[in-house]
Image: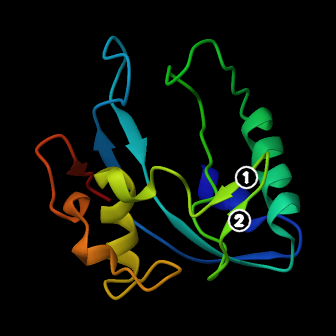
Amino acid sequence: MAFEDLAGLPLTTLKTRSSLYSSRPVGPQDQPDFVNAVAVLETRLSPLALLDQLQALEQRHRRVRKRHWGPRTLDLDLLLYGDQVLNLPRLVVPHLWLCERAFVVQPMLEIDPELRLPGGLSLRQLPSASPTNDLKRLPL
């Protein structure tokens, strides 16, 4: 499972993780529901070094990018990096669509209901903080 792999990243500790959630895919609907979760890592890696580690982990899980928003074995996104705001060619933090996706916001709120984004915006204030019919918390 991906959580164990995240815990094994160099210079990194898995602090906590959310439950698993299923949701309809974003983009093409001719694919199975996706399983989503959020993990909190404590790391001494730089943002780009962490991104490299996450992408290497995706490759170890044989991720293949056949089409945009298509099915995948594993998709790891770097959503936040502390309070930093980054706009680099390979990495934008906070993640561009973090605020719009209930399948990201709900697991984040499960971990930390008081979480605020860089700049102070509370996740609870986002429209995506209201659960939708297509997001289901999976049993343990």
CB atoms of marks 2 and 1 within 8 Å: yes
Q: Is residue 46 left or right of residue 124?
A: right
* Relative vertical location of residue 18 with respect to residue 54 in this rendering, above or below: below
N-terminal of the pair, mark 2 or mark 1, is 2
Q: Is residue 123 above or below residue 128?
A: below
Q: Which numbered circle lies on residue 86? A: 2
Where 109 sits versus 59, above or below?
below
- The image quadrant of residue 32 is top left
Horizontal side of residue 18 vs 122, given as left or right? right
Secondary structure beneath label 1 = loop
Residue 67: name its quadrant: top right
Q: Residue at x 71, y 65 (%)?
A: 86
Q: Residues within 10 Å of mark 1 (few under 14, many from 20)?
A: some
In three-dimensional space, the C-alpha distance between marks 2 and 1, rounded to whole angstroms, equals 7 Å
Residue under the point 42% across and 67% down: 18
**Residue at numbered disc 1:** 91
- The answer to whether residue 53 is visible is yes
Q: How is the image coloured?
A: rainbow
